[in-house]
Amino acid sequence: MKALLAVTRRDLLLAMRRKSEVLTALFFFVIVTSLFPLGIGPEPALLRKIAPGVLWVGALLATMLGLQRMFAADHADGTLEQMALSPTPLALLVGGKNLAHWLVSGLPLVVLAPLLGLQFDLDAGSLAVLTLGLLIGTPVLSLLGAIGAALTLGVRGGGVLLSLLVLPLFIPTLIFGAGAVHAHQSGLGATGHLSLLAALLALSLFFAPWATTAALRIALE
Amino acid sequence: MNWGGPAEFFAMGGYALYVWGSFGVVALALIAEPLMLARRRSEILRTLRRNAMADRMDQESS
Amino acid sequence: MSTALRSPPVMPMQDRVIHWFRFASPASFYPLAGKMMPWFWALAAIFGAAGLYISFFVAPTDATQGEGYRIIFVHVPASWLSMFIYMVMAAWAGIGLALNARLSGMMAQALAPTGALMAFLSLWTGAFWGKPMWGTWWVWDARLTSELILFFLYLGFIALQAAIDDPRRADKAGAILALVGVVNVPIIYFSVKWWNTLHQGSSVSMTRAPSMAQTMLWGMLLMALAFWMYSVAVALKRVRTIILEREGHAEWVRNLPEVKP
């Protein structure tokens, strides 16, 4: 456990030193979500309808931008190999990296989303469901995205390839997250969707680190 | 199923575009795939034969 | 006698074990695949002929969909195969990963393009079926949408393997991706179904095919068998080519009749 937190702390420190990368992804989130009203029209009723989807897709894309950062730098300078050779289980260290990635890439999205939701004239209840959904869902994105990042480590065309691999896996999270807000808006209540999101989180917490670890070992061979 | 004649068969009750558009593309794909594979196979065989000849010439000259 | 001092012959038990795993090597599988292929082509042709005959000359006109429904005789087999091939591909990839077996990885690599093609055909025929029936070239129903995502999963697998230069690393990375995909396919299908039922008022569904006359069922089954035999034949053909490409330096390849100058 201590090792996990140590890795998290280290990654956070490194991220803070390269703040621009982190902030760029966040600005991307803001800009992309603003593009949709510009493309579709400012009518509030329409915006309220598309808001959940737009904000969630924006969050997906912004998360994806930061995925390669998880392993690339450590792979380049040999730290990753040291981690693989250390007595601490690699899965634990991967968990630490996932946590750091989420704190730096996912959590800011959760904080920003309600503000952006106001641009789409979402009411307080919808904003709450949106935020809660993103809070549960963004860790899932980090966990699943880590698998893709590990598989494409050092591979040609890594960034775009990573998107192709990982976006299909994100779809259930997108459906349940955006669906939760829609359900709330139509009066059906978001509990069903949010529970499913929580289930996805539980599943990915258990299984994704294994896949990521296996993929890392393959990349390091 | 009794078609009144070839004309009726090809017309497919007005759905000709869709039925033949589907079956046609499927037939095309299931013919094109093995053909492309055959080409890939002859390419690799050509390379391997060329390498074998080069090896033999190396052996003969050494 | 000097012969008495030689080691005893191989025990029959070991002999049986060796025989089974012998075909796990590319060198022994190559000729075996070559011999099996014509049988599968023949079966594909036979089932295909029978299936097409039923599709066009036995199955009656549908009450609601007229002659247009006949597209199911290619749409449904293509869908079934696209899903079946993905499972088999993932299984081979998993076995290759677990046993560190080259040939299993090659088999997965051989299946992927055919599976992707099946997924594409399913989408294409689905669109051509949807246009006359429901007025649009694309319907976001649960099955077609899931098929689209399955197509993306295939493309990702192929792209990943194509991007990695080292064939062994490509095999193993592909295996992880395929296994992750296999676990996700039911989740994705469930979530898309959920999404579809909540968002669409009318239950327009391509899954509710016209009430099946016995003959229609037979037609679909025979066509599905035809597609299956075809896929096996093509996969065997492709894996033989992959074996040549990856094992080209080996002695047995150089001694093949098709390679020997």
Image (spheres, helix red, strand yellow):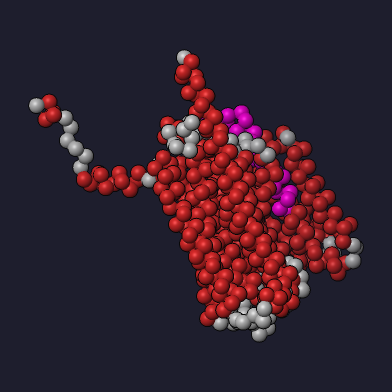
The single residue placed furthest to the top in the displayed view is B62
Q: Is residue A68 magenta?
A: yes
Displayed quadrant of residue A132: bottom right
Q: Is residue C33 visible?
A: yes
Total residue callouts: 0
Q: Is residue C98 magenta?
A: no
Q: Residue at x 76, y 63 (%)?
A: A52
Report x, y in % for residue C56: 60, 75
Main secondary structure type of the part rendered in magenta? helix
The single residue placed furthest to the left in the displayed view is C1
Q: Is C83 in front, or is B32?
A: B32
The single residue placed furthest to the front in the displayed view is B5
Q: Is residue C50 above or below residue A92?
A: below
Q: Is A171 in front, or is C173?
A: C173
- Say whether residue C81 is left or right of residue B22: left
- Say whether residue C238 is left or right of residue A45: left
Q: Is residue C101 visible?
A: no
Q: Residue at x 57, y 46 (%)?
A: B38
Q: Residue at x 78, y 59 (%)?
A: A54
Q: Residue at x 66, y 44 (%)?
A: A161
Report x, y in % for residue C119: 62, 59
**Magenta residues (range):** A59-84
Report x, y in % for residue C176: 53, 47
Q: Is C4 in front, or is A108?
A: C4
Q: Is C138 in front, or is C35?
A: C35
The single residue placed furthest to the bottom in the displayed view is C63
Report x, y in % for residue C63: 66, 85
Displayed quadrant of residue A17: top right
Q: Is residue C89 above or below residue A186?
A: above
Q: Is residue A92 above or below residue A39?
A: above
Q: Quadrant of the N terminus of chain C?
A: top left
